[in-house]
Image: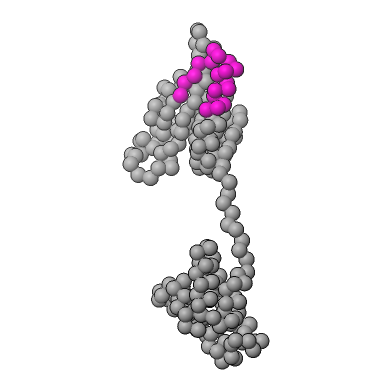
Amino acid sequence: MMYLFHGSDSDKVRRKAFAWVAAARAKEPNLAYVRLVREELTDSALEDAALSGGLFVKRLLVLIDDPFQSSRTAGGEDDDEKKTEGSLIEEHIDRLTDSDNAIIIVAPKLAAAKAKKLAARAKAEYRYDKPVAHETARGFNTNVVNALATHSRERLWLEINRALRAGDAPEMIHGLLHWKARDLMEKGGGAWKAQESRDLSLSLIELLQNSRRGGLNLPLSLERLALSI
């Protein structure tokens, strides 16, 4: 019987797998324990792992440690070595799953397709993934918009830099500025004259086009614009 431990949280995968082994050995003290690392995997080693223990040992507990590592490592191995490490488990999958021994495969960061294939044959699958890092949605940046509306170059430059350091995309900041420029054109009044807001809108359009053509990068272009208003 085969048990699969995998997932993107490598430390937790290994910790849980070895804790599982410790618990199994405590529950069944006569269970003989064998750990096979990737470099030790051969046809004969896997055949032995699948066989029953023998005269004095009824069952084996075999931990196969990271057998698919080479499939995730770029360069350095020849084709034969890659085949030996990457496909031996799959070639012996029937014997491993039908064995009376407990075969534990520890495979952190296993490719999704391979994990699905092995999980379908395993008696139990244990998956431990790192939490997905969700970006905090900052939403509408009122400070940038208000700084532009007040026609304050120092304040606008400061708020643009704060937004960039906080992780706001330059394209998003540009979009806010252009939206506000058009808003000033339509509504008029305030710190901007009608022609000034129109010139600002045209400058923002030109700034983005120049940046896309390979000119000054967008963050620096936004800073320069802020200091020029």
Q: Position of residue 175 (x, y in %)?
A: 57, 74
Picture quarter containing residue 159? bottom right
Residue at the far right in the pictured view: 187
Q: Position of residue 212 (x, y in %)?
A: 45, 74
Residue at 54% over, 81% down: 152
Residue at 57% over, 77% down: 147
Q: Is residue 84 above or below residue 47?
A: below
Give the position of the N terminus as an image quadrant: top right
Tell whether 134 sits left or right of 80.
right
Please say whether residue 122 is visible from this viewpoint. yes
Residue at the far top in the pictured view: 55
Tell whether 128 sits left or right of 77.
right
Q: Position of residue 35 (x, y in %)?
A: 46, 24
Tell whether 187 sits left or right of 48.
right
Please say whether residue 114 is visible from this viewpoint. no
Q: Is residue 51 above or below residue 167?
A: above
Q: Give yes or no for residue 33 being in the magenta stretch.
A: yes
Q: Position of residue 109 (x, y in %)?
A: 50, 41
Residue at 40% over, 42% down: 73
As rendered, which of 186 and 119 lies closer to the eye?
186
Q: Which residues are magenta?
A: 18-35
Residue at 51% over, 80% down: 153
Q: Give yes or no for residue 77 being in the magenta stretch.
A: no
What is the count of numbered marks? 0
Coloration of the structure image: one colour
